[in-house]
Amino acid sequence: MKRGSALVGVIWTLAVLSILIASYAVDAHLQTRVNLYLRERVHVDHLTDAGIAIAEVILTDYTNVSVPMDNGTESTSESEIEDKMEYDRWYMEKVALKDNRECDTGAIPVDALDRANGTVNVKIKPIESKWNINRLYAGGDPNYDKIWQAILVASGIPADHEELIESIVASWCDWRDPDDTQTGEYGAETEYYTEKYDDFQRHADREDSKEYRMYKNYKPKTRNGEISDLEELKCLRGFNEFEDEPISADALLNGGVLNPDEKEEDQIHVGGIKKYFSVFGSGKMNVNIADKDTLATVPGIFQDKGNHDDDAVTNAMDLAEAIVECRKQGDSIIRDKRVSASDATGSYSDWNDLQTRVQEAVHTASGEYLQEEAQQYLSYAPDKYFEVTITGTAMGISHSIKATALLQDGKVRYIRWQEDP
């Protein structure tokens, strides 16, 4: 019996020791992997740091590059480009940016002989292709109401719904402007929001109530200044209610049925206005990168003669499509002057260039053409704002940075920064 008990004790001791040894081994293995990950993560972070430096070199110098002229011999042009690339590692990226295109460095190895040591990729593109919403109010752009109307009608709100359009625009103006004076019948200042916010609190447990649905997004006071996130538009009176009936703020911003409580035949389907806006920018539209939908909302391209005719949208879209198509054609367009190699993208050089090329191509239903009014809203080269994306990769680990950069006085400042978005 004693010998049997001793044997059992030995077995149990060995079992416990085995478990302890195994757990120590697992811990050691995990610790080794953690240490390896941390080491590689630090390495990848260094790669993105290098990417930031590369991005800033490109941004601060892209306006200084020159593009070889096309003298009729392709080999000469290629030879000049090779010479420039020999002198400037980022020459082609700078040329792309100068020509309103996204520049992409590709995966750059830190060690050309061993890509396993990691790579970094840098992408930069101009982003002055949307309206800066913070400028579109009574204290900003004098034609803010025209631009808002074009955007709202283009998104799907019928042009003859004047009161609904007025409600949306007036409530935005009151949210944005610094004073407490209500704009028109449908505006709303802090006093209004405080009252409705309190009303919502009393109905917070009744999600099916009209009050809950109309006031659920409200804040107790207006911003009275610039917004930094377009989602804040969901807090506005004109985005949530009209004539004491709830409307969908999410649909107005992102697309959907604006008035789901109405009969199906009376429902308004909208495409969403978020795609037209940014929260920064010069107030001008870079005609060489803006998309067709946004260009169609530029005064002088969108031409509403006061009769609230939905044909204005169709005509504006025809003009905008002609602008984009001529931009795509590039060097297939015949010109009377010598052009640079960068003209293969069809970038417009100035207002006269834009007007000449588009007038020959456009065929709108009513024969509308570009109006001089559009000139003040259009630019032809990157201005100050860029989207920068940097990705460092090594040993299967990736670290990404997505930032909005402001280039001013030869220096780069980041006004938005997001890691591993």
Image (tube, helix red, strand yellow):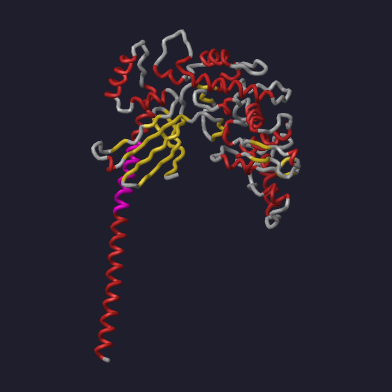
Q: Nearer the viewer, residue 323 or 208?
A: 323
In magenta segment, residue 41 = yes
- Quarter of the image with the N terminus is bottom left
Q: Nearer the viewer, residue 220 or 154?
A: 154
Q: Position of residue 88 (x, y in %)?
A: 30, 25
Q: Position of residue 324 (x, y in %)?
A: 53, 23
In magenta segment, residue 125 = no
Say if 128 sits above or below 46 in the image. Answer: above
Mark yes or no: residue 2 visible. yes
Q: Nearer the viewer, residue 82 or 211?
A: 82
Q: Nearer the viewer, residue 330 or 350?
A: 330
Q: Position of residue 354 (x, y in %)?
A: 53, 16
In the figure, is residue 49 to the left or right of 132?
Answer: left
In the figure, is residue 207 to the left or right of 413?
Answer: right
> Residue, x 24% and y 89% (percent of image)?
3
Report the label total: 0
Main secondary structure of the magenta stretch? helix
> Residue, x 60% and y 18% (percent of image)?
373
Q: Which residues are magenta?
A: 36-52
Say if 252 sits above or below 348 in the image. Answer: below
